[in-house]
């Protein structure tokens, strides 16, 4: 009779240990997922701040260009931009300095 009680106790202890192992594995898995998600969130926040900086810069540049287009100097500005791209007026000769 004592032997069956010991077997039942051993089975009960093995069951408890099994439950504890399963719970620890699940806890480790959940902890890993939480840490991974936290790292993803931090990366996305950094990416968002970079994109926001680019957006702010582009908005400022667009505002500057709108001001130029609304002013009287727009033809002068367009001429400067055209010259930067290598365009010239009719009959105009462009010389490039290759000595420097």
Image (spheres, rainbow, N blue to C red):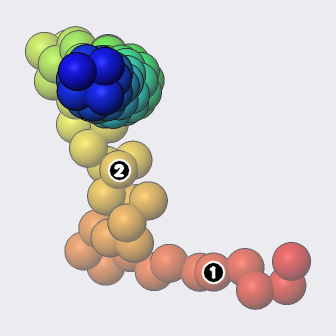
Give how far across and how far down residue 24 sits, in percent: 37, 24
Q: Marks 1/2: CA distance?
A: 17 Å
Task: Report x, y in % for residue 10.
Answer: 33, 27
Location of the C terminus (image quadrant): bottom right
| Residue at x 39% of width, y 47% of height | 80
Depth check, front residue: 64 or 8: 8
Please say whether residue 37 is visible from this viewpoint.
Answer: no
Sequence-earlier tag: 1 or 2: 2
Q: Is residue 70 left or right of residue 73?
A: left
- Residue 15 picture location, percent across and down: 24, 26
Figure quadrant of the N terminus: top left
| Residue sitting at the far front | 1
**Mark 1 burial class by Cα count in 10 Å: few <14, some 14-19, many 20+:** few
Q: Which residue is mark 2?
A: 81
Which label number is shown at residue 6? none
- Residue ID at (76%, 86%): 98
SS at mark 2 in the image: helix
The residue under label 1 is 96
Q: Do we see residue 85 in this rendering?
A: yes
For the residues carrying marks 1 and 2, which lies nearer the camera in this image? 2
Residue 96 at x, y percent in the picture: 63, 80
Q: Residue at x 40, y 60 (%)?
A: 83
């Amino acid at each position: 009779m004592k032997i069956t009680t010991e077997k039942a106790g051993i089975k009960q202890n093995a069951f408890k240990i099994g439950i504890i192992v399963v719970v620890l594995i699940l806890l480790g898995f959940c902890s890993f997922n939480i840490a991974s998600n936290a790292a993803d969130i931090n990366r996305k926040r950094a990416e968002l701040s970079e994109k926001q900086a680019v957006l702010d810069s582009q908005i400022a540049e667009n505002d500057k260009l709108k001001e130029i287009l609304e002013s009287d100097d727009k033809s002068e500005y367009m001429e400067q931009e055209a010259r930067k791209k290598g365009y010239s007026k009719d009959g105009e000769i462009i010389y490039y300095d290759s000595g420097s």
